[in-house]
């Protein structure tokens, strides 16, 4: 059968092209002055062949054989091309057919079917990935690259799935490196690297269009067009648009006391702080509260659906033009630009509704056969900076500031003998307290009856703003457009990332050497809505730079491969770091089909830009960056201990209050780099032409582990006095003033250990049926109680057990293709700065089928993800990602 789209290039050059619909090709620039000319022929799913020619030949007939898994070539593991069998670390590769089989709306979300990859979705399009534990909605311990450009949003050090990655129809392959990779990629390549490689317009010219529609009002349009102009110039443009009704969070569980120390249980008539309610502010009453002394009352708050006010539509727009020029047969220059924009909901310290948010990214790269020089810049945005335009907003701020709006006609004492206008929150709490004390006396001291009466009366006679009312809509509209810190909910992102790097490969008879270096600059801007910058001030500068080298040597007829790499990185706010990696790979068997590997690696993680420079008041706590010299204060347990003994709140009892507080002292130094040392062993084999096996085990030891810490102190870093502690607890529950509940990133003193293992089996019965399965085990060896003793959270956030079973194939002369996957994920504890709780186990079924009409160049597709609509929480506090099914057409002309 003819193979359209197979690539045929002269080895070591960019001269060549792809085959047409009849499997034919033509190369005009072959130089036979120094024969032979070696042709390299490749096609997805087939063995790459090399053919030597001594002179031009118009009658070449090339037959390609189906490839085995070990025939794959990868670049991410060692930053050079190498056979996947001799890669020194655990790596997963998806070819373009596997990418096309992904059924989720976002590419990253579809990676959950592969071993040791955990996915966290805050909403339909806001997705992050992780490997080997410590998963989160931000994935701060892995890096995600598209053609070696970082796809994270600079302000958030986080990815919105594949928003800034390669458009789906332009993806040639995806490679995932598991484990430490700082030796070649620098800081934050800590637990892994995800590299997406886009299609080369010289190798893949043509037009591809995909149109899909499905439930949740989903509409999806994707396009790629690439064209060669002569032999030296090629252009491509790719992109797309996707719309759907997003999933909304509705978790009514009580917020964990690690985050809200004095919370009440679910259903309490004193109210309680719920995970997915915003503005359910609490007030702890002192002696002036009468029978409420020492009790905390919470406002009703608002659901996510109420605050979004019908704006539950999510979308993603992307366009990526690119121009490539062959300066010589061996040197190529590429200039490209990418614009990505989305409406989505993101979860970190709060839930954020990002409106028309995204980034611009531009790159210039020059590369040869064994070297490259590249530079790129990324600029993020979150809607308009002008308050009159639509933009992004913080749901937590929106709910809280709706409660502190002035209640018409309600006045409270101003402390100077007069009155002032009061807020909805003050009216509610005042009314509640008055009715509670009256009912408490009338019911003979029955606290529960008093609370029920107070709550019913306050809800009816002193209500907060009612969702849907004109007053609510006017207040909401004002707050989502107000960017003033402490007054409005608007979020401004306007940070810049500039990155430059270069690499050269020296191939000698003695040893192969790679040398490279990189420089990265951050310019952080948020108009004070996220960082400690100001609206009219300069962006906050930060930088890091490093250099690396790798030595490798193949011995005994390439059966033994030794490699060692190391990288030195320097940071503005941290000490110099050295990241080494050493590995041994031995290939046994007649065809080197049995590959054994062992490696050691050390990696460093620089605290995120948020960890370093955040300044975000979320009401119940203020989040502060921790690179200024450390903090002094008291653990949050002090608040519960004092509240349990109301006598300590009397001004005359200050000495006893001081003595009690001294039992809860807290001290933190400035942040340091987090370090991991990892040992890995693995076995990868093509046992038979049909059977593929890949097994690995790792053990990680973390030092200076970065976790979060909540404590009570002064925002300038100093410790508070007993008098200020009492005032903060009784008047605002540390929600205002200089003495606050402060949340910082800090290094945990104890060593943290984790381990895991994974295995993949694949059996190819025939082109019509391939059966695959994988299992992953991850375990936090360090006991959770060790973290609890220090009041920190580990954020391991990873199922202990998970497995996938999948089938796929092509029949009817490859016209009919299909794939299906079943995934089971164990339940686990999910910890974050926003919410902590148990994520239940789940079972997910995905499937897709397609039929190709060859003469029409069209494939009819149907499929879906989570077909059984199972409960599918991936981030505690985020929505369950439910069923999404679709039908569509794929039009493809080579």
Image: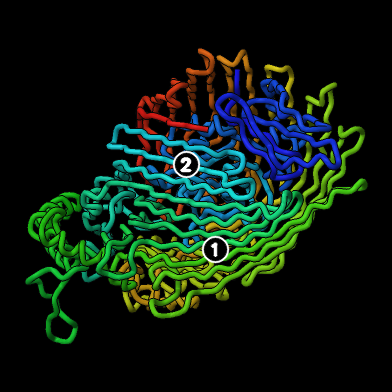
Q: Which mark is residue 377?
A: 1
Name the spot of residue 880 as percent of width and height, x first.
36, 38
Q: CA distance from mark 1 to mark 2?
A: 23 Å
- Location of residue 433 in the rendering, given as x and y in whole percent from the top left corner: 16, 63
Q: Tell which circle, 1 or 2, labels the residue nearer the N-terminal end.
A: 2
In the rendered image, the vertical position of residue 872 relative to residue 462, given as above or below: above
Depth order, front residue of 393/374: 374
From the viewer's perspective, is 243 left or right of 58?
Answer: left
Q: State yes or no: discs 1 and 2 in contact (Cβ < 8 Å).
A: no
x and y percentages locating residue 610 in the rendered image: 49, 64
Q: Secondary structure at mark 2?
A: strand
Q: 679 or 103: which is nearer to us?
A: 103
Label 1 neighbour load within 10 Å: few <14, some 14-19, many 20+: some
Mark 1 or mark 2, whichever is nearer to me: 2
Please determine whether, in this image, residue 61 is positioned above or below residue 662: above
Q: Is residue 523 above or below residue 340?
A: below
488 up-or-down from 236: above or below = below
Q: Quadrant of residue 646?
A: bottom left
Q: Is residue 579 left or right of residue 222?
A: right
Residue at 20% over, 53% down: 447
Image position of 15 (left or right of 358): right
Checking the image for residue 717, the label placed there is none
Q: Residues within 10 Å of mark 2 (few under 14, many from 20)?
A: many
The secondary element bearing badge 1 is classed as strand
Q: Which mark is residue 224?
A: 2
Q: Residue at x 57, y 71 (%)?
A: 542
Location of residue 294 in the rendering, given as x and y in whole percent from the top left corner = 29, 63
Indicate how the structure is coloured in the image: rainbow
Residue at left 15%, top 63%? 474
Answer whether residue 470 is visible to the viewer in this image.
Answer: yes
Q: Foreground: 379 or 571? A: 379
């Amino acid at each position: 059968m003819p193979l359209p789209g197979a690539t045929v290039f002269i080895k070591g050059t960019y001269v060549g092209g792809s085959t047409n619909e009849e499997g034919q090709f033509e190369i005009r620039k072959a130089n036979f002055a120094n024969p032979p000319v070696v042709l390299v022929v490749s096609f997805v799913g087939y063995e790459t062949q090399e053919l030597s020619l001594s002179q031009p030949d118009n009658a070449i007939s090339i037959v390609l054989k189906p490839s085995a898994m070990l025939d794959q070539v990868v670049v991410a593991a060692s930053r050079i091309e190498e056979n996947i069998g001799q890669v020194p670390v655990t790596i997963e590769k998806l070819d373009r057919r596997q990418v096309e089989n992904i059924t989720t709306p976002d590419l990253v979300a579809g990676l959950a079917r592969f071993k040791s990859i955990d996915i966290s979705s805050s909403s339909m399009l806001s997705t992050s990935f992780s490997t080997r534990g410590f998963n989160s909605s931000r994935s701060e311990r892995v890096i995600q690259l598209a053609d070696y450009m970082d796809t994270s949003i600079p302000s958030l050090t986080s990815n919105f799935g594949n928003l800034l990655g390669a458009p789906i129809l332009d993806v040639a392959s995806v490679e995932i490196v598991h484990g430490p990779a700082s030796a070649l990629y620098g800081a934050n390549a800590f637990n892994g690297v995800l590299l997406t490689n886009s299609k080369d317009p010289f190798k893949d010219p043509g037009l591809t269009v995909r149109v899909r529609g499905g439930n949740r009002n989903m509409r999806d349009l994707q396009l790629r067009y690439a064209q060669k102009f002569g032999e030296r110039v090629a252009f491509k443009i790719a992109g797309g648009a996707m719309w759907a009704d997003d999933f909304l969070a509705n978790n009514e569980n009580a917020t964990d006391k690690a985050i809200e120390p004095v919370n009440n249980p679910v259903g309490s008539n004193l109210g309680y702080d719920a995970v997915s309610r915003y503005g359910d502010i609490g007030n702890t009453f002192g002696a002036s509260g009468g029978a409420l002394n020492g009790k905390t009352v919470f406002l009703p708050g608002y659901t996510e659906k109420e605050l979004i006010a019908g704006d539950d539509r999510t979308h993603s727009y992307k366009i990526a033009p690119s121009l490539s020029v062959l300066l010589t047969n061996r040197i190529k220059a590429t200039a490209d630009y990418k614009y990505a924009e989305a409406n989505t909901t993101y979860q970190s310290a709060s839930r954020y509704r990002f409106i028309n948010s995204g980034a611009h990214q531009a790159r210039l790269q020059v590369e040869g056969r064994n070297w490259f020089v590249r530079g790129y810049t990324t600029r993020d945005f979150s809607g308009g900076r002008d308050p009159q335009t639509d933009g992004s907003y913080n749901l937590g701020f929106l709910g809280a500031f709706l409660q502190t709006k002035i209640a018409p006609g309600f006045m409270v004492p101003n402390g100077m003998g007069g009155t002032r206008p009061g807020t909805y929150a003050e009216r509610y709490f005042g009314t509640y307290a008055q009715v509670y004390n009256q009912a408490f006396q009338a019911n003979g001291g029955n606290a529960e009856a008093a609370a029920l009466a107070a709550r019913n009366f306050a809800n009816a006679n002193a209500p907060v703003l009612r969702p849907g009312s004109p007053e609510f809509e006017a207040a909401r509209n004002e707050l989502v457009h107000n960017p003033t810190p402490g007054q409005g909910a608007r979020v401004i992102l306007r940070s810049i990332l500039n990155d430059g790097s270069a690499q050269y490969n020296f191939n000698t008879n003695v040893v192969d050497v790679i040398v490279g270096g990189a420089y990265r600059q951050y310019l952080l801007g948020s108009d004070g809505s996220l960082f400690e910058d100001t609206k009219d001030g300069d962006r906050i500068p930060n930088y890091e730079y490093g250099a690396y080298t790798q030595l490798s040597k193949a011995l005994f007829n390439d059966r033994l491969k030794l490699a060692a790499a190391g990288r030195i990185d320097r940071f503005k706010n941290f000490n110099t770091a050295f990241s080494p990696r050493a590995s041994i790979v031995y290939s046994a068997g007649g065809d080197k089909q049995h590959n054994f590997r062992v490696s050691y690696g050390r990696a460093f993680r620089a605290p995120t830009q948020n960890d370093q420079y955040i300044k975000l008041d979320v009401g119940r706590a203020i989040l502060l960056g921790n690179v200024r010299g450390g903090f002094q204060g008291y653990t949050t347990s002090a608040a519960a201990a004092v509240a349990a003994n109301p006598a300590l709140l009397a001004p005359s009892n200050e000495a006893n209050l001081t003595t009690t507080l001294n039992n809860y002292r807290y001290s933190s130094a400035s942040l340091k780099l987090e370090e991991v040392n990892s040992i890995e062993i693995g076995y990868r084999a093509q046992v038979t032409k049909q059977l593929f096996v890949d097994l690995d085990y790792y053990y990680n030891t973390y030092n200076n582990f970065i976790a979060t810490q909540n404590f009570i102190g002064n925002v300038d870093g100093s410790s508070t006095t007993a008098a200020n502690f009492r005032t903060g607890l009784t008047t605002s529950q540390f929600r205002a003033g200089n003495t606050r509940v402060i949340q910082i990133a800090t290094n945990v003193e104890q060593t943290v250990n984790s381990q895991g293992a994974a295995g993949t089996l694949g059996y190819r019965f025939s082109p019509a049926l391939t059966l695959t399965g994988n299992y992953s085990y991850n375990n936090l060896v360090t006991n959770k109680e060790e973290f609890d003793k220090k009041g920190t959270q580990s954020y391991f956030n990873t199922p202990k057990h998970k497995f996938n079973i999948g089938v796929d194939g092509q029949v009817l002369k490859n016209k009919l293709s299909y794939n299906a996957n079943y995934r089971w994920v164990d339940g686990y504890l999910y910890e974050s700065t926003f919410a902590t709780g148990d994520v239940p186990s789940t079972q997910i079924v995905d499937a897709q089928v397609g039929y190709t009409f060859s003469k029409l160049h069209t494939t009819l597709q149907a499929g879906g993800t989570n077909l059984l609509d199972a409960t599918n929480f991936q981030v505690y506090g985020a929505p369950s990602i439910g069923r999404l099914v679709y039908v569509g057409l794929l039009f493809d002309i080579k």
